[in-house]
Amino acid sequence: MLQTWVKEVVQEDGMIEYSLGFPNLEVSTAFTNSLLDIFAPAEKKFSLRKILARALRLGDMEQFKTAIHALFAAIPYHNYTNNNIASYEGFYASVIFAWLSSVPLQLIVEDCTNKGRIDMNVETNNTIYLIEFKVDMPGEKALSQIKTRDYAEKYQAKGKKIMLIGIGFSSEEKNVTDFLWEEGMPG
Protein backbone atom coordinates (compact mmCIF):
# COMPACT_ATOMS: atom_id res chain seq x y z
CA MET A 1 0.00 0.00 0.00
CA LEU A 2 2.84 2.41 0.78
CA GLN A 3 4.24 1.95 -2.71
CA THR A 4 1.05 3.37 -4.21
CA TRP A 5 1.82 6.52 -2.21
CA VAL A 6 5.32 6.98 -3.64
CA LYS A 7 4.92 9.88 -6.00
CA GLU A 8 8.32 9.89 -7.66
CA VAL A 9 11.69 8.25 -7.44
CA VAL A 10 14.66 10.33 -8.53
CA GLN A 11 18.20 8.99 -8.77
CA GLU A 12 20.97 11.53 -8.46
CA ASP A 13 24.60 10.70 -7.85
CA GLY A 14 23.70 7.17 -6.86
CA MET A 15 21.19 8.44 -4.30
CA ILE A 16 17.54 7.57 -4.40
CA GLU A 17 14.97 10.15 -3.35
CA TYR A 18 11.38 9.36 -2.63
CA SER A 19 8.53 11.84 -2.58
CA LEU A 20 5.62 10.65 -0.53
CA GLY A 21 2.18 11.31 -1.98
CA PHE A 22 -1.26 10.66 -0.60
CA PRO A 23 -4.33 9.07 -2.16
CA ASN A 24 -6.64 11.87 -1.01
CA LEU A 25 -6.92 15.05 1.05
CA GLU A 26 -8.20 13.24 4.16
CA VAL A 27 -5.14 10.98 4.36
CA SER A 28 -2.82 13.93 3.72
CA THR A 29 -4.51 15.98 6.47
CA ALA A 30 -4.41 13.09 8.93
CA PHE A 31 -0.71 12.50 8.22
CA THR A 32 0.12 16.19 8.64
CA ASN A 33 -1.88 16.45 11.85
CA SER A 34 -0.13 13.35 13.23
CA LEU A 35 3.26 14.89 12.53
CA LEU A 36 2.16 18.15 14.15
CA ASP A 37 0.96 16.25 17.21
CA ILE A 38 4.33 14.54 17.50
CA PHE A 39 6.64 17.47 16.75
CA ALA A 40 4.74 20.64 17.64
CA PRO A 41 5.42 22.19 21.02
CA ALA A 42 2.58 21.68 23.51
CA GLU A 43 1.59 25.37 23.46
CA LYS A 44 1.05 25.24 19.66
CA LYS A 45 -1.10 22.11 19.65
CA PHE A 46 -4.30 23.97 20.44
CA SER A 47 -4.36 26.32 17.50
CA LEU A 48 -7.43 28.33 16.66
CA ARG A 49 -8.53 25.48 14.36
CA LYS A 50 -8.42 22.93 17.17
CA ILE A 51 -10.14 25.31 19.56
CA LEU A 52 -12.89 25.75 16.99
CA ALA A 53 -13.35 22.01 16.43
CA ARG A 54 -13.40 21.35 20.16
CA ALA A 55 -15.90 24.16 20.80
CA LEU A 56 -18.31 22.73 18.21
CA ARG A 57 -17.85 19.16 19.39
CA LEU A 58 -18.62 20.18 22.98
CA GLY A 59 -21.28 22.76 22.11
CA ASP A 60 -19.28 25.55 23.78
CA MET A 61 -20.81 28.60 22.12
CA GLU A 62 -18.75 31.10 24.13
CA GLN A 63 -15.54 29.49 22.90
CA PHE A 64 -16.89 29.32 19.33
CA LYS A 65 -17.75 33.04 19.51
CA THR A 66 -14.28 33.87 20.88
CA ALA A 67 -12.57 31.84 18.15
CA ILE A 68 -14.54 33.54 15.36
CA HIS A 69 -13.79 36.96 16.84
CA ALA A 70 -10.06 36.11 17.01
CA LEU A 71 -10.14 34.90 13.41
CA PHE A 72 -11.46 38.21 12.08
CA ALA A 73 -9.20 40.22 14.40
CA ALA A 74 -6.22 38.49 12.77
CA ILE A 75 -7.09 39.65 9.24
CA PRO A 76 -4.73 42.55 8.40
CA TYR A 77 -6.40 45.94 8.07
CA HIS A 78 -4.89 46.55 4.63
CA ASN A 79 -6.99 43.69 3.25
CA TYR A 80 -9.92 46.08 3.62
CA THR A 81 -8.33 49.19 2.09
CA ASN A 82 -9.49 50.51 -1.29
CA ASN A 83 -12.46 48.13 -1.36
CA ASN A 84 -15.79 47.60 0.36
CA ILE A 85 -15.51 43.85 0.95
CA ALA A 86 -16.38 44.32 4.65
CA SER A 87 -19.89 45.35 3.61
CA TYR A 88 -20.72 41.97 2.11
CA GLU A 89 -22.16 39.06 4.05
CA GLY A 90 -20.50 36.70 1.58
CA PHE A 91 -17.06 37.83 2.69
CA TYR A 92 -17.68 36.87 6.32
CA ALA A 93 -19.44 33.64 5.33
CA SER A 94 -16.56 32.69 3.01
CA VAL A 95 -13.91 33.28 5.67
CA ILE A 96 -15.83 31.16 8.18
CA PHE A 97 -16.52 28.50 5.54
CA ALA A 98 -12.82 28.25 4.65
CA TRP A 99 -11.90 28.08 8.31
CA LEU A 100 -14.51 25.43 9.17
CA SER A 101 -13.47 23.42 6.11
CA SER A 102 -10.09 22.87 7.75
CA VAL A 103 -11.61 20.66 10.44
CA PRO A 104 -13.39 17.33 9.91
CA LEU A 105 -17.02 18.47 10.08
CA GLN A 106 -19.99 18.11 7.77
CA LEU A 107 -20.56 21.55 6.34
CA ILE A 108 -23.19 22.90 3.95
CA VAL A 109 -23.47 26.50 2.77
CA GLU A 110 -26.62 28.02 1.31
CA ASP A 111 -28.55 24.98 2.51
CA CYS A 112 -32.01 25.10 0.90
CA THR A 113 -35.22 24.34 2.75
CA ASN A 114 -38.84 24.71 1.71
CA LYS A 115 -38.86 28.25 3.21
CA GLY A 116 -35.47 29.67 2.27
CA ARG A 117 -31.74 29.12 2.54
CA ILE A 118 -29.71 28.63 5.68
CA ASP A 119 -26.42 30.51 5.29
CA MET A 120 -24.48 27.63 6.81
CA ASN A 121 -25.06 24.40 8.65
CA VAL A 122 -22.40 22.49 10.52
CA GLU A 123 -22.98 18.96 11.74
CA THR A 124 -21.06 17.08 14.40
CA ASN A 125 -21.83 13.63 15.80
CA ASN A 126 -24.28 15.06 18.32
CA THR A 127 -25.29 18.53 17.17
CA ILE A 128 -26.45 20.42 14.10
CA TYR A 129 -25.60 24.14 14.06
CA LEU A 130 -27.74 26.36 11.83
CA ILE A 131 -25.93 29.64 11.27
CA GLU A 132 -27.26 32.86 9.75
CA PHE A 133 -25.03 35.88 9.05
CA LYS A 134 -25.98 39.57 8.84
CA VAL A 135 -23.80 42.61 8.14
CA ASP A 136 -24.62 45.92 9.82
CA MET A 137 -27.74 44.37 11.32
CA PRO A 138 -28.23 42.99 14.80
CA GLY A 139 -27.68 39.30 15.40
CA GLU A 140 -31.29 39.15 16.63
CA LYS A 141 -32.39 39.60 13.00
CA ALA A 142 -30.27 36.63 11.93
CA LEU A 143 -31.56 34.43 14.75
CA SER A 144 -35.12 35.54 14.09
CA GLN A 145 -34.82 34.56 10.42
CA ILE A 146 -33.80 31.01 11.37
CA LYS A 147 -36.82 30.72 13.66
CA THR A 148 -39.48 32.42 11.50
CA ARG A 149 -38.51 30.34 8.48
CA ASP A 150 -38.44 27.14 10.55
CA TYR A 151 -35.03 26.12 9.19
CA ALA A 152 -34.65 23.52 11.95
CA GLU A 153 -37.61 21.49 10.63
CA LYS A 154 -35.42 19.96 7.96
CA TYR A 155 -33.23 18.33 10.62
CA GLN A 156 -35.82 17.23 13.19
CA ALA A 157 -35.76 13.58 12.14
CA LYS A 158 -32.00 13.24 12.69
CA GLY A 159 -32.45 13.05 16.46
CA LYS A 160 -29.58 15.44 17.16
CA LYS A 161 -29.46 18.57 19.25
CA ILE A 162 -30.07 21.62 17.05
CA MET A 163 -28.40 24.96 17.82
CA LEU A 164 -29.55 28.15 16.13
CA ILE A 165 -26.83 30.80 15.77
CA GLY A 166 -27.25 34.38 14.57
CA ILE A 167 -24.04 36.27 13.89
CA GLY A 168 -23.94 40.01 13.22
CA PHE A 169 -20.87 41.66 11.70
CA SER A 170 -19.97 45.34 11.52
CA SER A 171 -18.52 46.62 8.25
CA GLU A 172 -16.90 49.42 10.25
CA GLU A 173 -15.33 47.21 12.94
CA LYS A 174 -14.75 44.34 10.48
CA ASN A 175 -15.59 41.79 13.12
CA VAL A 176 -18.36 40.07 15.03
CA THR A 177 -20.59 42.50 16.92
CA ASP A 178 -23.43 40.13 17.82
CA PHE A 179 -23.32 36.41 18.43
CA LEU A 180 -26.59 34.94 19.68
CA TRP A 181 -27.61 31.33 20.03
CA GLU A 182 -30.32 29.16 21.39
CA GLU A 183 -31.29 25.56 21.22
CA GLY A 184 -33.76 24.82 18.43
CA MET A 185 -36.61 22.38 18.40
CA PRO A 186 -35.74 18.99 19.85
CA GLY A 187 -34.50 16.38 17.43
Image (cartoon, rainbow, N blue to C red):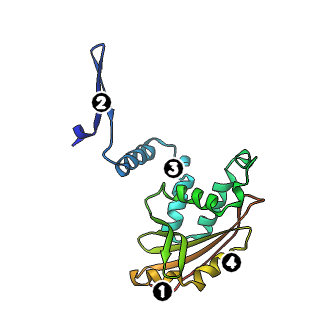
Q: Nearer the viewer, mark 4 or mark 1?
A: 4
Q: Residue at x 54, y 65 (%)?
A: 55
Label 3, residues with CA under 10 Å away: few <14, some 14-19, many ≥20: some
Residue 85 relative to residue 112: left or right: right
CB under 8 Å between discs 1 and 2: no
The quadrant holding residue 35 is: top left
Furthest-top residue in view? 13
Label 1, residues with CA under 10 Å away: few <14, some 14-19, many ≥20: some
Kindly report the distance in space between the C-alpha atoms of the residues bearing marks 1 and 3: 35 Å
Q: Nearer the viewer, mark 4 or mark 3?
A: 4
Kindly report the distance in space between the C-alpha atoms of the residues bearing marks 4 and 1: 22 Å
Q: Residue at x 39, y 80 (%)?
A: 158
Give 169 or 161, whichever is nearer the viewer. 169
Question: Which label sits on residue 45?
Answer: 3
Q: Mark 4 or mark 1, which has the lower sequence index?
A: 4
Q: Residue at x 46, y 74 (%)?
A: 127
Q: Which quadrant, please, contains the N terminus?
A: top left
Kindly report the distance in space between the C-alpha atoms of the residues bearing marks 4 and 3: 36 Å
The residue where tag 2 is placed is 8
What secondary structure is marked by label 4? helix
CB under 8 Å between discs 1 and 3: no
Q: Is residue 162 above or below residue 67?
A: below
Q: Is residue 164 above or below residue 177?
A: below
Label 4, residues with CA under 10 Å away: few <14, some 14-19, many ≥20: some
What secondary structure is marked by label 2? strand
Q: Nearer the viewer, mark 1 or mark 3?
A: 1
Residue 84 relative to residue 17: left or right: right
The residue where tag 4 is placed is 141
